[in-house]
Image: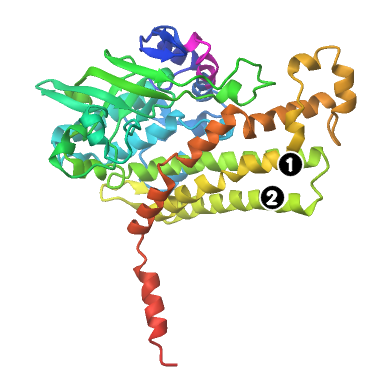
Amino acid sequence: MGIRTGQQYLDKLNSMKPHILIDGEVVREKVADHPAFATVARTYAKLFDMQHDPQYMEALTYESPTTGDRVNASFLLPRTKEDLARRRAAIRTWAEYSNGFLGRTGDYMNSALTALAGAEKWFTQADPMFGENIRRYYEMCRENDLLATHTLIPPQANRSVSGSEQLGGQLAARVVEERGDGIIVQGARMLATIAPIADELLVFPSTLLRAAPEDAPYSYAFAVPNDSEGMRYLCRASLYNGGSVHDEPLAGRFEEMDAVVVFDNVFVPNERIFMLGHPELCNAFYSETGAGALMTHQVVSRTLAKSEFFLGLASEIAGAIGIDGFQHIQEDLAELIETVEIERALMTAAEAEAAPSPDGVMLPRWATLNAARNWYPKVAQRFPQIIRKFCASGLMALPGEADVASEALPDIEKYLQAKTLTGPERIRLFKLAFDASISSFAGRQSLYEYFFFGDPVRMAGALVNSYDREPARSRVREFLAREE
């Protein structure tokens, strides 16, 4: 089959029967037409269509090694540094379309599946079947152009104990029965972003498991269709208020839904299980397979596009209202430039120092990507702050699209004009600034980026503990030992 069109994606989504709860309503059909999901579903459909557009096809696709059909380039198993650059070009094409505001485009989990399939032998430590399963599943997703998301952590009930201990072990999703043909899963997981509009849900290990027997039921990796029997999604309220893309330019296109997934005796067949038990292997699931490296490679490509967008937005605002000559404004613009160039340099360095894994998969340098994923969540918090500073009270006095088309237009043209923009043009620019800096959508984006890879404090500790500091320390000791 190969790459799908946007209409094929929407038709498949509308044919599925998931169990979605949102705003007191149960949604079981035609998800792509529901007001809470329709706009972002159409955006994802556009991404599928881009694969068929001659302008983007070469960047976004390659020939399947098994069928010769065009498939998404994020499924390309990198064997060379050129392959990594090829993957990045595809990822960047989608990231530029969304300006980095879509955090769960298909290339994110495609990158994970690609690395996992390349590490097929690693899974044989638990069972040869698991290695075969992950390879076959990766090939199925590649050849059918499936959109997958994942769910990773237990719900927050009592953070003072481990996930397996919360509510006496009855809260977190766990294996409650092992059968000859598969497993039964009960409990809940979060955070399943875009789950209502995905084809598949990947339930991958939480990497905070203790290597203790009681953690075995919480140690697994598997995949299920989005509408598996017994599975329910508890969605938050939509952050899109139903306005036009003039008034909600970001939320009206990129409002990815987040959900808690509840497993109520969900059956997972053997062929969809990639790991079962083995907490110690689950804890190493991302690091030893290379999945963490390829996933982070995708994320840094996306967030670089987002950093560039905020630099462009801040520059447009500064020029439009004539503040770009002030030194305190230039200081903030310089900060955004530095962020863009540092992130670009980190990506370049990670690819330049890439090395093959034991399985021959070319992986970008993890230490560099790990530094990038620890650094970006903090610097990204400055983006909306800078936009708010530049716009100031201008964000508080914004008529809408309907006002521009009303008798208010003469007043808008006279009193809301900018140095280089008409009144209507200024409103459109500032609506974008509003949605990027102070709307509910903007608040969710800031939270999402800050905790994208987990608790920043815990991540910092993991960075310190995994980084080889001995060469730097030995240089200090050598210097102290010098006699002259």
Q: Residue at x 37, y 24 (%)?
A: 260
Identify the secondary structure beneath mark 1: helix
Residue that numbered label 2 is attached to: 332
Residue at image point 45% right, 53% down? 371
Task: Give x and y (percent) for residue 186.
Answer: 23, 22
Query: Helix, strand, or loop for circle 2?
Result: helix
Quarter occupied by residue 43: top right
Residue 51 visible at all: yes
Whole-percent x, y for residue 448 in the image: 49, 35
Residue 96 in percent (x, y) is at 58, 34
User: Residues at badges 2 and 1 in contact (C-beta under 8 Å)?
Assistant: yes
Give the answer, above or below, for where 246 lies relative to 100: above
Q: CA distance from mark 2 to mark 1?
A: 9 Å
Residue 19 higher or lower than 329, as above or below = above
Magenta-colored span: 32-43
Amino acid type, mark 2? Asp
User: In the rendered view, does 70 fall on the left or right side of 154?
Assistant: right
Instruction: Tell me if 375 is positioned left or right of 270 in this view.
Output: right
Residue 456: mark in rendering: none
Is 355 contained in the magenta span? no
Q: Residues within 10 Å of mark 2 (few under 14, many from 20)?
A: many
Task: Judge by depth and name the residue closer to the eye, 84 or 161.
Answer: 161
In magenta segment, residue 41: yes
Q: Which residue is labeled 1 in the image? A: 390
Return the residue found at the far bottom: 484
Q: Position of residue 386 (x, y in %)?
A: 67, 43
